[in-house]
Image (cartoon, grey):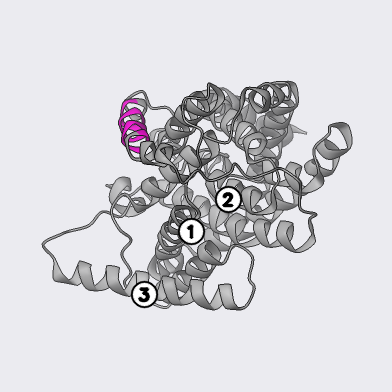
Amino acid sequence: MTGPPDLETRFEQRSNWKDPDWWRSALLAYTIALIGGGIASQAGFPLPWMLGPFFACGVASGAGLTLSALPFGRETAQLIIGLGIGLRFTAATLISTLLLAPAMLVSTAYVIGYTMVAAFLFRPLARVNHSTAFFATAAGGVADMALIARERGGDASAVGIVHALRVSMTVAIVPILVVSFGESGNAPDRLSDTGPSVLWLLPAFCLAVLLAKLLKKTRMPNPWLVAPMLLGIVLGSTGLLLTAVPPVAIVGAQVLLGTWLGSQFRKELLLTLPRVALAGIAASLFMICAAFAGAVLLSATTSLSLATAFLALAPAAVTEMVITAKTMHLDPEVITGFHVMRIFIVCSSSLLVFRLYRYIGRLLAHA
């Protein structure tokens, strides 16, 4: 099997503004999303305005309905979340987060380790080659990992499916576990400022968009989250902008994220590679369990709560884990730090780790 000719088209939905069918599918998507969010909210579901649209749109899309997410909807949501988290940083919280850098490095090594084990488990189950197995389970961005896999003889379609399943399962399982069984923290929310400083959020958002576009040219991973977060850290820790992103904007960001995630389900994609999909589900469950096991150790050796450690080590879905942390008052700044360091190291060292993975594979084959 060969990779898809256009990964951007397959994994990043873009609109055709001149096509009436697109408008109908977009209207249908957000109608379903709002209904799902409303039902989840009334039922007391955790993170209702993200998980409600996610489950509702996922079921509808998986059943064969054509749903379209707004162009740059996911990026807009990440900009809002990133700026909101960055603005939470004061000089004191920035220093306390940096003091956890050694734990972040060790945790990143652990994530790389358990994703490598997942690759060894995934390969015989899915019956794919080494390149496909490694990059399908690596904790990096789907587009980057799929393209690198294709360059090295892997199946980009299989990589994309497994990443989509991993992110979806992480979003569906981890927040529910944390909210249902974890203990809420005592991290205070930044007080919303209803004065003139709130008006500065709009130019700050526009500046974040510009910075994200500049960072995207450098191939920095996840620029739509990293850029506004860095900008917010500068503005918040220096006291230049002492305000918070309004709660309604956070809810809107959750709806955008949930709708985008749910609309990515494609029944025909799963049916074309059923063995890969089933193996991807098994590998994703393993990685979530491995993240929890590591969280127990991380919590025991640091001052972090088990819930915070679990969110910090969860395989991908950084934006959704940060939203969960914010809901649970669990220091989203710390969780952001863990994920951002993991993203940087994984993306910058993926080829080196891939060589290590192949070397270990050869040793196991001759054992």
The residue that appears at 19% across and 71% down in the rendered structure is 21
Circle 2 Cα neighbour tier, 10 Å, few/some/many (<14 / 14–19 / ≥20): many
Q: Judging from the image, what secondary structure is the residue with disc 3 in?
A: helix
Per the image, is 349 magenta?
no
265 relative position to 333: left or right? left
Badge 1 vs badge 3, beta-carbon distance below 8 Å: no
Which residue in the structure is indicated by mark 3?
A: 31
348 relative position to 100: left or right? left
Which residue in the structure is indicated by mark 2?
A: 323
Q: How far apart are marks 2 and 3 (CA)?
A: 22 Å
The image shows residue 58 at horizontal and vertical percentages of 47, 69
Front disc: 1 or 3: 1
Between residue 63 and residue 202, name the one nearer to us: 202
Q: How far apart are marks 1 and 3 (CA)?
A: 15 Å
Q: Specify which label sits upstream in the sequence, 1 or 3.
A: 3
Which residue in the structure is indicated by mark 1?
A: 251
Q: In this picture, is 229 found above or below 184?
A: above
- Residue bounds of the magenta highlight: 204-214
Q: Judging from the image, what secondary structure is the residue with disc 1 in?
A: helix
Kindly identify the amino acid type of the residue bearing the numbered disc 2: Ile
**Quarter of the rendering containing residue 44:** bottom right
Q: In this picture, is 218 found above or below 160?
A: above
Q: Specify which label sits upstream in the sequence, 1 or 2.
A: 1
Q: Main secondary structure of the magenta part?
A: helix
**Number of numbered discs:** 3
342 relative position to 84: left or right? right
The image shows residue 341 at horizontal and vertical percentages of 60, 28
The image shows residue 45 at horizontal and vertical percentages of 63, 70
Circle 1 Cα neighbour tier, 10 Å, few/some/many (<14 / 14–19 / ≥20): some
**Quarter of the rendering containing residue 334:** top right
Q: Judging from the image, what secondary structure is the residue with disc 2 in?
A: helix
